Amino acid sequence: MNGTVASRDWPRPGVPLIDGIDKVTGHARFTADLDPCGALVGRIFRSPVSHGDIVRLDVSRARDLEGVVAVVTGDDCPRTYGVLPVAMNEHPLACGKVRYRGEPVAAVAAVDAETAERALALIELEMRELPAHYTADSARAAGAALVHDDRPGNLERAVHHVFGDPEAGFAAADLVREVRIDCAEVNHAQIEPHAALADYDPATGQLTMQSVSQVTFYLHMMLAHCLQMDESRIRVIKPFVGGGFGARVEVLNFEIVTALLARAAQGKVLMQLTREENFLTHRARPQTAIRLRLGMRRDGRMTACECEVVQRGGAYAGYGIVTILYAGALLHGLYAIPAVKYDGYRIYTNLPPCGAMRGHGGVNTRHAFEVLLDRMARELELDPFAVRRMNLLSAPTRTLNELLVNSYGLPECLDRVERASGWRERIGRLPRGRGIGMACSHYVSGAAKPIHRTGEPHAVVNLKLDWDGGVTALTGAPDIGQGSSTMIAITVAETLDLPLERIRVIAADSAITPKDNGAYSSRITFMVGNAAIDAAQRLKDILSEVAARKLGVRREDVYTAAGMFLARGSDATAVSFEEVAKAALVGEGTLTIKGTFTCPPESQGGKHKGGAVGATMGFSYVAQVVEASVDEDTGQVTVHQVWAAIDCGHAINPLAVTGQVEGAVWMGMGQALSEETCYLDGLPAHASLLEYRVPTIIESPPIDVQIVESHDPLGPFGAKEASEGALASFAPALVAAVANAIGIDLDELPATPDRVVEALIARRRRARLKSAQESAP
Amino acid sequence: MHQDQRPPSRKRLVRLCLNGRWREDAVPDHLLLVNYLRETVGLTGTKTGCDGGECGACMVLVDSVPMPACITLAVRCEGRSIETIEGLSSGGSLHRLQRAFHEQLGTQCGFCTPGMIMSAAALLRRNARPTDGEIREALAGNLCRCTGYVKIVESVRAAVDDAP
């Protein structure tokens, strides 16, 4: 465990967000709320077809319209960009070819929105249409038109991993079963729509960019790359961000387009995307088809796992290669399985590109896995909790694919939700139509190997102590509502034994804060938390030295408590933090301290190809129970209550941990019950928040959150992630609850009324067929 | 000559009482209340989260009734009282709903929060002791993507219990 924590008592109350008051008063400025003085309005012209060559693009009439200041096209940015250095194949504005309906082709900056929209109507585009593929099957078929000429079969990436001896494992099994599971594409649907404000100063050649980014450093890098500017001429600032959930990890085309417009207009451009455009610019969880086979002994012990995953990736690479790798890598790390074979296929299609979404890559395979585990338990007449307990890991250990597991609180999570939900008393005793189901999940606490391997530490935090006695923490880690700045304030305050009010956090402004790899893979608490503790510890060392001089005692006899430095053995002598801070500045001036964290090499994954994906310092573990009822006439599934227990190592802020777990469970519920994005010939059919059915407060159940603390040896105060792991176990627990309620096994997500009714009809048909066969002569 | 080429004016004067103070502005007929508040007045606490009437992030009170400002015309507010999140706290202290949303973590990213609080404020004004069911019903038009609504219900409940 890194750092010492002031309070280990339980329950600890937790603290509200340090920026919470700005949010409840409406003072918080999100990107669209920034000073629009002098800003032009940006708008994007999008492709009306899904796949085609650009024959003629004429923007001259738009450019000539009174009030239009700049028009940009693919000619203004010949370079491709992307989040993975090995797969940067996207243009901010189409160059020569479009690959999905709605892809940006040109953009205008005008004095007001009406003029900008009139200008869009004056753009002339002539296309030669190509055959388009909207499903992975169609894109993989022989002779299919290629989305990218260099990717035969429209195969973005195939992954083949074998660990252990699956054949021997299946041979040793008493029961081998297989499922085919289909999960619809879902969307982050963060409530703040995408927006960017770019300000280009032609006199100095400097660009200031404010955007909704989760990773301002990627944005900074890609702006420099696409605009062919020196990185040092660009400043990227993150205002308040209204949720991310993975949507804003990758640099998005509109951000680069806004900067291109600002430079072309030699001024300031504000771009605000509509909700419909947000659905086109989504990078969310791909539609996934899974075939999964498990071998099990009669006592519930697993002997082997074989899994094939096909992801409909969309038109560009984005994060795709990582997503398809995660889908296999996270088969490991939750249970002990002696043999695992994984085949993953990421397919290009003519749809908006998918990317990372909360629980990146692991959610859909975990769903299939837990669903099959539940069905096999039933067949063997074993309790689903008992089956999980037969397959537990024992920490510390390394998984077959060389992932590090240093702490493992899953057993206690199982105990806690089993008790809290009254499982033993209630399973099998609920009235028809009502059921309970359970499942488990896990997630990484930060990707141990960053995408850009620069040799720098994984996290850097700067602390500034000045004459006012306040401590300012400077971090590049973007707080996007998850409470990361509050987490940093707490770790610094606890290390220094100071009240939280004395800590100020400034986050994600490239001119002020140190570089950070950003808000993704739940890395901030583990990595940046550790760096913050390191910085605070260094500051404490310096101040303790000064305090020792003031107290006239040896350095090792100085300790801190509640904002005071005290001398051991003589409690009467004490000096306040303020006094010590003032003394520390004598002859020195303002103190600036740096803390860092680097993931140990043994946490950075195996040597096999793709082995870095899934590698982390520690996994969160979750068990959850869902109680639901099904109306067999309408097919409506209602969730009544959820119990979720999370092993987050140590809850730095218990209030925020429960908030994150509730949000993750609930987002899992949306995917399980109602959320899906469908396309009609490439046109999004669910491109509004009325058609894309995010659960409202009416259908959202109470969620009981239990915190389990396994005290990870490497975590900051022993902490691990708490924001993503709980999502993946909701859907399988819900499907198990439906099976428990009405005896129907659902193979598709979401469990919408039409799918439930279809399953009920299919069962009636099977029953009729069976009785007809039995009564036949 | 130059004067004659100017486009005809499409604005009219609107007087309304915003957060307790009367004001008068020239607004185009098609201007939405949300854009009036954000662009004309400069109060950005009221948010736009969708393409019209989907999410509730722009909820304001028009004569104490919660209305999505993104589907309300500014000119229709002539003579009316408009309340936004900026007008909720008074005398330097937070409204009990604001305090509860802050302390109970009813806000995470904060984008839906102003609209959510305004809907809740309207509820508490007409029903001082709502049940959990009534709270859920009153907030059914406000989407939140962060909290799963658990702590939102708890926040409103805490504000109800905190009533003077």
Image: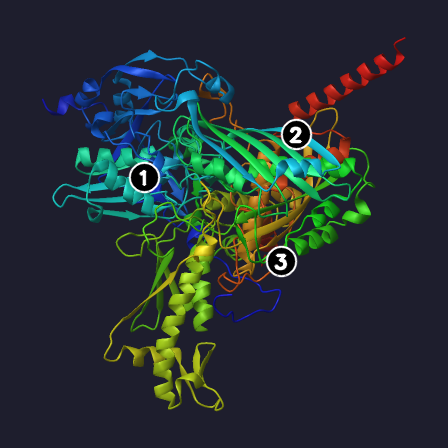
Which quarter of the image is occupied by the N terminus of chain B?
top left
Q: Same chain for the residues at labels 1 and 3, yes or no?
A: yes
Local SS, label 3: strand
Q: Is residue A338 visible?
A: yes
Front of the two marks 3 and 2: 2
The image quadrant of residue A330 is top right
- Compared to residue B73, the image places residue A493 above or below, namely below
Q: Quadrant of residue A144?
A: top left
Identity of the residue drawn at 50% across and 61% down: A714
Q: Earlier in the sequence, mark 2 or mark 1?
A: 2
Which residue is under mark 3? A708
Q: What colour scheme was applied to this rendering of the protein?
A: rainbow
**Percent from the top left, x then y, of residue A153?**
43, 21
Circle on res. A264: none
For numbered disc 1, what is the local secondary structure? strand
Up-down relation of residue A582 to residue A72 (above or below): below
The kind of residue tagged 1 is: Ala
Mark 2 neighbour density, 10 Å: few (under 14) some (14–19) many (20 or more): some
Q: Amino acid at mark 3?
A: Val
Discs 2 and 1 lie in a common subunit = yes
Subunit ID for the residue under disc 2: A
Identify residue for label 1. Answer: A196
Percent across and percent down for residue A394 are 63, 56
Question: Is the residue marked by circle 1 packed among few (<14), some (14-19), or many (20+) residues within 10 Å?
Answer: many
Amino acid on which the number 2 mark rests in the picture: Val
Q: Is residue A472 above or below residue A215?
A: below
Q: Secondary structure at mark 2?
A: strand
Q: Which residue is mark 2?
A: A179
